[in-house]
Amino acid sequence: MKRLSLLLLTFVMLFSLCACAAPNSAETTPSTTDATEATLPPRAELQPMLDKRKVPELKSREEMLDILQKEVYGYMPPEPTELTFETEYDVVSTYAAGKARIREVTVNCKVNGNPFSFKFRGVVPNGTEKVPFIIHIGMAIGEHRYQPNEEIVDNGFAVFNFNYTAVASDDKDFTKGLAACLYPDGERGDTDAGKIAMWAWAASRVMDYCQQEMGHKLDLNRGGVAGHSRCGKAALLAGATDTRFQYVYSNDSGSTGAALARLKMGEDVKRITSLFPYWFCKNYKQYALKETEMPFDQHYLLACIAPRHVLVGSAYLDENADPISEQLACLAASPAFENGFVCDGAARVGDEFLEGDIGYHMRAGKHYFSREDWQKLMKFINLHSTPAK
């Protein structure tokens, strides 16, 4: 009997607790408006944060490009003296259920009198209208985890991409690939091009093909270049040095990409030049632990893209890249653009600031070139362009 009474008492107590913990759902479930901007704390102001960084004032595009090449990336490799293309069509039959054709192109050229070649792939939607296009400095050739081809085609875009290591190996060896054409003995001077400059150079050769061979299919006024991480740094340099790229996208490029170096969290100049000295010219390592003494910062790279368009994408959990330093670089570069950075404060997850000629967005998650990032890039291009007639 005592045991039964104890069980009944326990049941009553549990029922009471549940009733207290979960009253009428209509009273406790927040409405849609409860989760809107009105309930969130005010955005942190960006200008005071930027003021603390004390970045150098912007200069002319020519001056900034010269500084960046001399001190960071090395001077760009020369344009080829000879350039031809070999195209193989329909390398994947019935690709994308017949919505697009996929081609593989071999670039053959001479650099410093030396022969050099590399391959890239292009996916172009079927149809008669000219389409916008993106040249992706990729980590593989063709479709891969960082490039959702069919989704890009469904949005009305063509995409071309090459494997960055097919141009120049991602290591300290300067005796292979394009590096061998530039430095026959494998040795560089202090301001000679590092690997990032070589990958950027290759993106311009793909643009050569688009201009010379694809003008009837592509809208050359809506062509862009994009890259993720180290390839995002290369995409920014390609866009800064080659004005044919009307749109430039950096995804999670971080240190020596889209992020300011001064007071940056995560990867700094010392770490990146210790791990990857071959990405840059030899001069750059002198600024290790001396970021505040640099006569430049990464807003120069973004500003060199003006008056065209640049979009910077960040991931909230990408602490190495430091999203706030990427957003501050957009603000610092803003005066170079006719319609500068339009933003009302520090970004939250899911925010997109796409109205200005220089834009920014931040998504949830980690270091990755996601479908969401591609969607933001295509939206940005469509927002700032008019289709060819």
Image: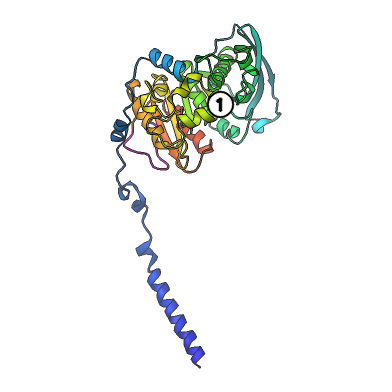
Instruction: Give the number of callouts.
Output: 1
x, y (%) of residue 293? 36, 24
Q: Is residue 107 visible?
A: no
Residue extending furthest bottom? 1
- From the viewer's perspective, is 210 left or right of 319? right
x, y (%) of residue 76? 51, 14
- Indicate the amino acid at tag 1: His
Q: Is residue 73 visible?
A: yes
Foreground residue, 262 or 260?
262
x, y (%) of residue 333? 36, 25
Kindly identify which residue carries mark 1: 136
Foreground residue, 1 or 352?
1
Question: Could you say which quadrant of the image residue 107 lies in?
Answer: top right
Asked whether residue 249 is drawn in magenta, I would say no
Asked whether residue 348 is drawn in magenta, I would say yes
Location of residue 222 with respect to 321 vertically, above or below: above
- From the viewer's perspective, is 50 left or right of 321? left
Give the image's coloring scheme: rainbow
Magenta stretch, main secondary structure class: loop
Location of residue 47 with respect to 201 vertically, above or below: below
Question: Could you say which quadrant of the image residue 309 lies in?
Answer: top left
Callout 1: 10 Å neighbours few (<14), some, many (20+)?
many
Query: Magenta region: which residues?
Result: 343-355
Foreground residue, 231 or 218?
231
x, y (%) of residue 156? 54, 29
Residue at coordinates 58% horizontally, 33% vertically from top-left?
A: 147
Residue at coordinates 69% horizontally, 30% vertically from top-left?
A: 94
Say which element carries label 1: strand
